[in-house]
Amino acid sequence: MSQFNRRDSLKSLAALGAAGSLGLLSPLARAQKPLTVGVIYVGPRDDYGYNQAHAQ
């Protein structure tokens, strides 16, 4: 059984605070225009498998 000491609790609190502060910055990082994503197929697009599932 492990002990939960003051150092571990302070590290957890610091990590929680850092994660919370990153959540506050997300509206500032919003894209100004729609994001365009490209896909490179390895093989034919209509192979009735992985490529076709992503092409639909």
Image (cartoon, helix red, strand yellow):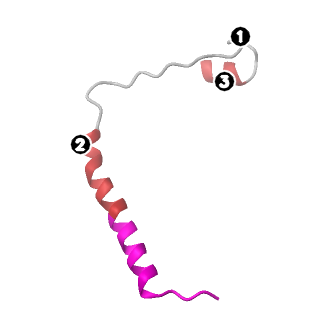
Q: Quadrant of the C terminus?
A: top right
Query: Secondary structure beneath disc 2?
Result: helix
Q: Mark 3 or mark 1: which comes first in sequence? A: 1
Q: CA distance from mark 2 to mark 3?
A: 34 Å
Residue 32 bears which disc, if any?
none
Residue for badge 3 = 53
Image location (x, y in percent) of residue 51: 68, 20
Q: Amino acid type of disc 1?
A: Pro
Side of 42 relative to 34 (left or right): right
Proximity of marks 1 and 2: CB atoms separated by less than 8 Å: no
36 to 12, vertically: above or below: above
- Which residue occupies 41% across, 86% down? 6
Range of residues picked out in magenta: 1-17
**Hey, what amino acid is under mark 2?**
Leu
Reading the image, the residue beneath label 1 is 44
> In the rendering, at what x and y percent does residue 50 appear?
71, 25
Does 47 sit left or right of 34 as displayed?
right
Q: Is residue 56 visible?
A: no
Q: Counting residues from the N terminus, which is met first, the one under dot 1 or under dot 2?
A: 2
Amino acid type at image mark 3: Ala
Q: In terms of sequence position, does the residue under pointer 2 or pointer 3 come before the other?
A: 2
Label 1 secondary element: loop
Q: Nearer the viewer, mark 3 or mark 1?
A: 1
